[in-house]
Amino acid sequence: MEVERLPFIPQEIVVGILSRLPVKTLLQFKSVCKRWYYLISDSQFVKMHLKQVAKQGERILLSSNPYKLANPLYSIDCDASCDHHQIKKINFPSNDPAYKGDVYGSCNGLLLIGYCDCKLFLWNPFTREFREIPYPHITMNFYERRLYGLGYDSSTDDYKLVVVIFIDELDCSFLVYVFSLKSSRWKKNIEICPYEVAYSQTKAAAAVVNGALHWVMIDSIDGDCYKVVCFDLAEEKLKDIPLPGSLDASDEVELCLGVLGGSLCVVGIRRTSVRRTVKVWVMKEYGLQDSWTNLINFTYNESLAYIAPFCFTNSGDIVVELEGKNILMVVNGERKAFGAILVDKVHEMPFTHMETLVSVHGSHGSWKRCLKRKIR
């Protein structure tokens, strides 16, 4: 009896199919054979998979603890939040209280977690990889006004952790520590910037756009007006980002930064005794002030601290957190009104993330070279 042979499938097609599968399935497929193990572990395949995941949009990760990260965490698909099959439960990798800190940044599936300004960790919740990063050697006692961020430098194909410390009000100097995942080393720079760190931004996760980390700062010389400052990961320099020309950046307006659809987003909130007026802008072309577009304006009477935008849904609505109400809601862009409640009783600040294979240990070799090896 003649055995029917399976048709030959070109390797490029196999790679294309695998790059569209979820992380959990790919981790299981690593056990199929050595060839697939090396392929799925390879940096070029990880990038290919990342591009596919980015097309699907981001998820939101929530903590079940009102103060710190704690088990379990919940990963929510904003476009299918009513479907409980789309809400994934994730356990933190350690029960040690020292590992349960604050989320200082999120980039391409990696989370930067800090604990008491003395410990830093990288964690990929879906591959379960966890790595402690040695904290930079800071000789002086600085306990306030620290900024943190995690981003990807495409010019060097490297992920970088950044710690910015405000050290001198007289000359507005900052210590900037940059940790390269590729070299596993810290670099220290002194930057001069004519602004002060806004207390609301201390330990807040940076908005990561266009290879730069963004925070809100205060220009105390110009009447305590808000400014947006970015740290360019390629040049490793602090720079100004222009705010919308129609935005009143006085201290009567509270600013919140975010990322919507891959673009820098700023939310301005003006308070009166009876209502809050909210305006949301998106920078369509990065770095160009004229490209700021007023996306939505609305007014509400609730006593909320702020509204933080997170992501778009497939229908074009905006997912926001209402602090004070501790809930995630959808803002309908056409009707300019609050829509469905996605999640009630949000404890810790939620944050967006993606389900990726990006490693906390850096890059690996080329999958094409791996496929050419003679695997015994």
Image (cartoon, helix red, strand yellow):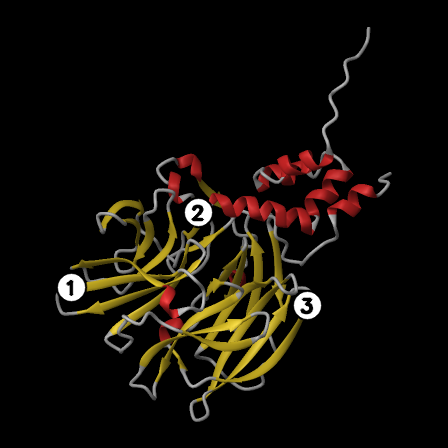
From mark 1 to mark 2, how far is it between C-alphas?
33 Å
Left or right: where 69 falls relative to 94: left
Residue at the image position 27 percent from the left and 49 percent from the top: 333
The three-letter amino acid code for the residue at tag 1 is: Arg
The residue under label 2 is: 74
Q: Earlier in the sequence, mark 1 or mark 2?
A: 2
Disc nearest the viewer among 2 and 3:
3
Q: Position of residue 185 (x, y in %)?
A: 67, 72
The three-letter amino acid code for the residue at tag 2 is: Tyr
Q: Position of residue 251 (x, y in %)?
A: 26, 78
Between 72 and 198, the one nearer to me in the picture: 198
Q: Position of residue 219 (x, y in %)?
A: 36, 83
Q: Earlier in the sequence, mark 2 or mark 3?
A: 2
Left or right: where 56 falls relative to 278: right
The three-letter amino acid code for the residue at tag 3 is: Ser
Between 243 and 133, the one nearer to me in the picture: 243
> Residue 275 shows which numbered tag?
1
